[in-house]
Amino acid sequence: MSTIKKYKNHIFANKRRKLLGLDGGQLIKSYFGNSALVSILILSLITIFLFKEGIGFFGQNYQSLKLYRASALEYVDIIRSQNEGFLALNRYLNSIRTQQSKILDEEGYTFSEIQKEIKKDQAFYQNFSRLNKEMSQFIASIAEQAVGIREQAVININLKEKSDFIDDKIKRLRKKKKLNDSDRFELSQKLVQLSNTYRSHPEKAESLRLRSEAIQKNIWNQEDLNQFIDFLQTDKSKIAITPVDFETEVAKVIARSGEFYHLSSTMEENLQKVLKNPLVFSKYPELQKSSDRFLELIYLFLSSFAQTKESLDQWSPNKPIAPHTAFTAFITGKDWTTASDWQDVYGLLPLLTGSLLVSGIALLFAIPFGVGAAIYVNQLASLKEQNLIKPYIEFISAIPSVVIGFFGIAVFGKFLRDFSGIDFLSWVPFFPISERLNAFTAGGLLALMAIPTIFTLCEDALNNVPKSFKEASFALGGNRLQTIFKVIFPCALSGIVSAILLGFGRVIGETMVVLLCAGNRIKIPDFTNGVGTIFDPVHTMTGIVAQEMGEVVNGSIHYRALFIVGICLFFISLLVNYLSQWIVRKYKVSNG
């Protein structure tokens, strides 16, 4: 009886131990039963953090675009764009020369004979080189003026930020008359920055470093604090902001447009002469074909002259930039250029197209293998085969992505490049491939990572088809294959599509494999190459964040641009998950 009594007292004691009206069991059940609430909370925190760090990008990008126009960099870029066309012509002409040397060498010409043949057209090549040099020198000169205007404006902006920082710190220190942890950290960083500016005064720099260490150790007294306030005021008095006279400086740049028009006119006259007296290679059809193509490119280039002149005439540094331009320039931008001496550009398109191309290649392999394996294991395989195949497929998901990436660099990419160089495959237009790290290498490895996800979810979808459907099909005379492809597969189609979408979300969010194996070339793939495009190096959204986040300055426009890329990835993942859940709910087969 005493044992029973003790047990009852223990139960009643537990009942009396409550928190917020709930006993231990109810608390545990409440905590683990509200997983949806916890998920929503975590999702909200992630969203808030991403937007907090990234949303400032559009304001900074807008100010950058305004400065880009105000300093005449945009004007110079119009001139540079025309010169890029001429540089392309020059490169093509040099390729004809190289092709000519190669053909002559294959025909047995000696080196001196090859040089003699090439020198017949020496004046033709030299004329192009001279024009290219003159235009390049002019553009370098006028670009230096525009960059100088921009740099002075940026210096003024930095000085203003420094002045505002000092003003704010003086006000806070005079008000608080003490140092908290936040002030201590900021002041320590400020002293380190100031010590770096006094390299010509070692004693002063050393004093500042000692003060920084004192702040970190919290050994300052009130006298030290007052001295530091006086020091900040003295430092602020040295800040001199000289406004940039944009109107006068930009007018100097525009005044040089006459030089550009003169060079363009000379260039046009010489190109017209080329059209009248083109390079002729009657003995060599391949060279003649290249020469004819060269003439077509000249016609296209000459047609751009009028458009360039019109753009320069219509350009104005005072033309307002719409606020939404900061957003559209990012979404539709075709370049991603950072740490540039000219102008940083943040465009999403090359990263988005790279991500979609790699993901598309991955799904091209993962869907047939993943879905096919799920159908075979679930419907056709024996128990022994199921126990062998299923664990091995699911084990792939346990392999670290960095290991798969190393395999891609050391084995898979090298194998693809060597395989494409086999003489037997020389008939393939884009073989041999020059880059072992490209979209196909990354996509093939991502397919390997996506197969377990698609396989597992597809098998679950097949298991959810009511057994009565299968039995009814057999009862009506259907064989096994007819039952699989005309009854079971259509009924599980919503789950299979959902599995494919989740597989897509898996590969588009992968980082290490694409960072190591995709080639990391920030350029929109040239889709005019057809199927050969899949062997072009690309960069992806996940790859750019992983590659550049560790090197950016906290709070800079580059830092916030990477967070905006992260936000885009975040919403893509949310959309994919929402679509998969919607498809399952809408087309779910009833067990009734």
Image: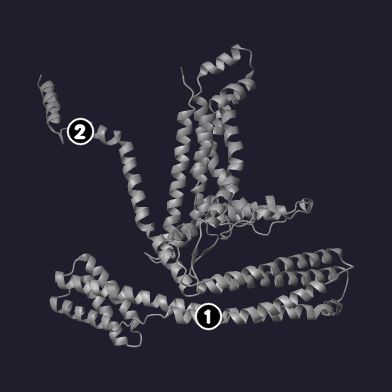
Number of dots carrying numbers: 2
Q: Position of residue 515 (x, y in %)?
A: 52, 56
Circle 1/circle 2 CB separation < 8 Å: no
Q: Position of residue 183 (x, y in %)?
A: 22, 68
**Residue at horizontal 57%, vertical 36%?**
370
Q: CA distance from mark 1 to mark 2?
A: 77 Å
- Quarter occupied by residue 131: bottom right
Q: Position of residue 311 (x, y in %)?
A: 58, 69
Q: Quadrant of the N terminus?
A: top left
Res 253 label: 1
Q: Position of residue 440 (x, y in %)?
A: 62, 51
Colour basis: one colour
Classed neighbour count for the residue bearing mark 1: other residues with Cα under 10 Å, few (<14), some (14–19), many (≥20): many
Viewer-proximal residue, 535 or 285? Answer: 285
Query: Relative to 393, is 217 on the left or the right?
Result: left
Viewer-proximal residue, 409 or 51? Answer: 51
Which type of secondary structure does the marked residue at label 2 adopt?
Answer: helix
Query: Relative to 320, is 83 on the left or the right?
Result: right
Query: Relative to 492, is 35 on the left or the right?
Result: left
Residue most extreme to the top: 475
Residue 135 visible (yes or no): no
21 w.r.t. 188: above or below? above
Res 135 label: none
Give the amino acid type for the residue marked by disc 1 in the picture. Val
Res 24 label: 2
Q: Earlier in the sequence, mark 1 or mark 2?
A: 2
Which type of secondary structure does the marked residue at label 1 adopt?
Answer: helix
534 w.r.t. 472: above or below? below
Give the amino acid type for the residue marked by disc 2 in the picture. Gly
